Amino acid sequence: MANLLAEQGVKVQLLEKLDETGGLSRSFDRGGFQLDIGPHAYYAGQAPLYKDWIGAENILDVRGIYGVGYKRRQITTPINPTNLIKNLPVTDAAALALDMAFRKTLGKLTAKPEPEHFESVDQLIQARFGEKVTQFFFRDYIPKVTGLSARAVHEDWFLERDRFYKEHNLWANLLKTLLKIVKPVTTDGATGQHGQLQFLYPKRGAGQIIQGLTSKVRSQGVDIRLGYSVTSVEPHGDGPVTVKATNAEGVEETFEADAVASTIPVTALAKGLRPLDTELVGATSGLRYSALRMFYFILDRPRLSDKIQIYFPEKKYLFKRIYETRNLNPDMGSAGRTAISVEVCINPGDANDQLPAEAIQERLIGELGDFYGVGRGEVVDWFTHRVTECYSVYANDYRKNIDPLVKRLFAEDRVVAYGRTGAFRYNFLSDRVLAASAKVAEYLLSGRPKQEVLGQPDPKNPFL
């Protein structure tokens, strides 16, 4: 967004809490591998921007496969009868495929439309895919991510994912895919064939994009202040917005701006809005984010899997997702070795949050041995990184808790919140961040009221 505004001659000041820009879009160099915080995919629709920031020669065209790990088998996504029959034991595959087929056929015969809203994500998934799929792949996975049972999680948890899959053609028709090869269909650079995506990736990891963009905006005159924590945001009607922030030395500074775009967690923004609204703070205190403990392993084997990322729904595994950087850039690292990123979701203060890193590392190696046959002697190196406020937790009452803030921000034309934490969006990938940034920049440049741009207050708007 700073880039877009600066291009139009707008003076921009950026306050960043960390000691470097990028947030989740950062990479660590270890043993010649560039290891990201989470898997990152960049799509062709935004390719001109990426080429401008880091050069076309630094962008790779990648075709990747996603999957689900279940009963020591890897099932290519999306979950459909074809993939189940190919990858699961006969009895499990038959039970799942028949249940899915029955659910689909029953829906056609009864022509009964889905209700406008479901009581929980568990109920929605059952209605879409049947009880067996819900039981096998979601009922234990959802608590891993959210810390809540599937029956206590809002339907938006699934709908956010579903929107992504539809955008990139990953949902195949459940019955038509049975015993049929689906031809790839390209939309905005993404190809869907049984979970396979065609996308772009920077040669030196996701952080390379941010490094290039940071250099670009600095050359445009954007003032980037690192190590600043925002403490308050006070709009003054048609006048300037006052922002107070504490710098890395603990000294509070005051800034004046015509408008403010915030990506800080909505819970922190509610506490910092002035004048202080205790009812608003009380409502948003019911919102929470889960965190990540990332564990990175360099293994003495050429490859662990052919999947870029694979999800693990079974309760017995602490990790919920693994991704392998060689499947993004085969030239990373040294010959004969591979690097994997292991993602463990935690809720601040829970048992997994309290464990020392060495204890979790030992457990993860044991689980990698159980699923992939990784031996302890194959672990050449490892390190860990903790990420706070990573995923929005869509509890059943989250809309009730966020609505007061949405309405408050809706009335503030000079304060905008957007992004994964700033708009409390669960699945907010790179292309969506850029699209939202463009929408925010367009809005700020227009000078129009939010009502004219967004309509009614809704937490699913591109910005709040």
Image (cartoon, rainbow, N blue to C red):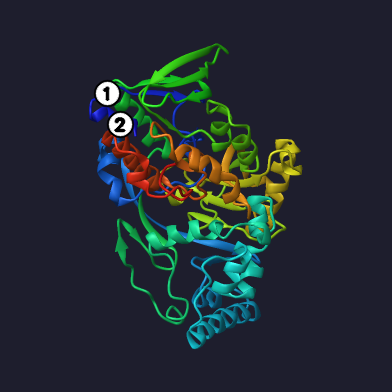
Quarter residue 51 falls in: top left
In front of the other: 237 or 420: 237
Residue drawn at x 53%, y 40% is: 405
Label at residue 220: 1
In percent of width and height, residue 97 lies at: 56, 80
Q: Is residue 171 above or below residue 335?
A: below
Q: Which residue is mark 2?
A: 3
Instruction: Mark yes or no: residue 168 visible.
Output: yes
In percent of width and height, residue 44 lies at: 29, 51
Q: Secondary structure at mark 2?
A: helix
Find the residue positioned furthest to the bottom. 109
Crowding at mark 1 (Cα within 10 Å: few <14, some 14-19, many 20+): some
> Pointers 1 and 2 in contact (CB under 8 A)?
yes
Find the residue positioned furthest to the left. 8
Q: Amino acid at mark 1?
A: Gln
Q: Amino acid at mark 2?
A: Asn
In percent of width and height, residue 374 lies at: 64, 52
In front of the other: 339 or 309: 309
Label located before the other in sequence (1 or 2):
2
Residue drawn at x 61%, y 40% is: 284
